[in-house]
Image (cartoon, grey):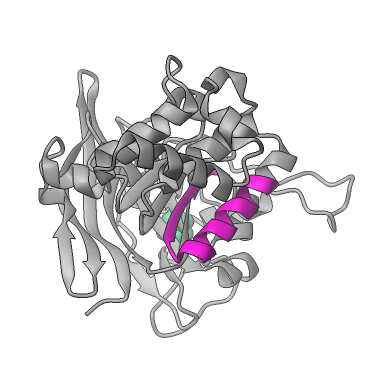
Amino acid sequence: MSDSLLEVRGLKVGFTLREGKVQAVDGITFQIPRGRVLGLVGESGCGKTVASKSLMRIEHPAVIEAGEILFHRTPSETVTVQQLDPTGQEVRALRWNEIAMIFQEPMTSFGPMHTIGSQIEEALMLHQDVSRKVATEKAIEALISVGMPRPAIVMKQYPHQLSGGMRQRAMIAMALCCHPSLLIADEPTTALDVTTEAQILELLKERQQALGMSILYITHNLAVIAQIADEIIVMYLGRIVEHSDVETLFLTPKHPYTRALLGSIPRVDQDPEGRLVAIEGTVPDPYTRPSGCPFHPRCPDCMPGLCDVKEPPNISLADGTTVNCFLYSEAELVTR
Ligand code: SF4
């Protein structure tokens, strides 16, 4: 029996390109509990989108090289996702019905040649095997559930006729129309202004609680994740460097990378003349990963001879945080 909806164990996903091998996801392990929101944070290129696409088997052209993805359909029925044929019936039944995804820019997710209504109806007819008439009724219900104004008119409109915020509402309606138990939201508010972003976050929170679903919320923005997540994992160069509940992470960040990310967010109580902390250096070339700890070339706490030689272990601390860094030991919670 498990109260996790999804478990990922030691997942490795890579690309083999002409220029060389890219290890986009390098042995990550995490769980998403039922009815909870897990935030996945990291800079562009850290592997968060590739990891999340693997959960639905849409990782191509990347390849899952190792690890397990276990989707617990019920506490006693588990689907071993990494073993499914990415083009087979079983994974198609899983997608949308049980795991759905919304993307950063709905303009590129909706087909430009079809109306919003026909695209939601198509998803319903394909995944729920209902008639066109029932699909139309359910599509209108789905648009109403996300607070879409004039849903009957929106059904007949094309994506380019809607504002960014309305398009994202329509995308959420389509993702939730089959009542999935897991929603993967990949930077769903990045392309929106802050007012619309706040409305979409509020909508996702309301839908998550009303439907009791779990959300994997992916973003590069820690300020956004604070508003919606219960737990947070921080990724750097394909690895999870810190995993904690949201309050612990914001109050006592442990990994130097997490501390640097938090230090780079503007705060209302900081000196208006002061400078924001920048993370030294840039993300390394993916074809030449640093030896030892992948963060060592940018880390202010790097211990030469150790961090640049050995890979740090995952340490479980007394406050529930797991951190991948030599600064900590299992025996005690080190506060910096
Ligand atoms: Fe920095 Fe060393 Fe910790 Fe890596 S292991 S984050 S280099 S202190």
Quarter occupied by residue 202? bottom right
Tell me, yes or no, if residue 158 can be seen here: yes
Q: Eyeballing the image, is 196 above or below 212?
A: above
Left or right: residue 58 versus residue 285 is left
Quadrant where the C terminus sits is: bottom right
Q: Position of residue 305 (x, y in %)?
A: 37, 55
- Between 23 and 5, the one lying in front of the other is 5
Any magenta on residue 190?
Answer: no
Q: Position of residue 246 (x, y in %)?
A: 56, 67
Q: Eyeballing the image, is 271 above or below 173?
A: below
Q: Eyeballing the image, is 325 above or below 248?
A: above
Any magenta on residue 216?
Answer: yes
**Residue occupying the far front of the picture:** 133
Left or right: residue 198 versus residue 10 is right
Tell me, yes or no, if residue 191 can be seen here: no
Quarter occupied by residue 241? bottom left
- Between 88 and 83, the one lying in front of the other is 88
Q: Position of residue 9 (x, y in %)?
A: 23, 61
**Residue occupying the far top of the picture:** 113
- Residue at image position (57%, 72%) is 248
Q: Position of residue 201 (x, y in %)?
A: 62, 50
- Residue at image position (58%, 76%) is 335
- Between 115 and 259, the one lying in front of the other is 115
Left or right: residue 260 versus residue 307 is right
**Which residues make up the magenta segment?**
199-220
- Residue at image position (23%, 64%) is 73
Quadrant where the N terminus sits is: bottom left
- Between 268 and 181, the one lying in front of the other is 181
Q: For ligand 1, which image quadrant applies?
A: bottom left
Quarter occupied by residue 197? top right
- Residue at image position (62%, 65%) is 250
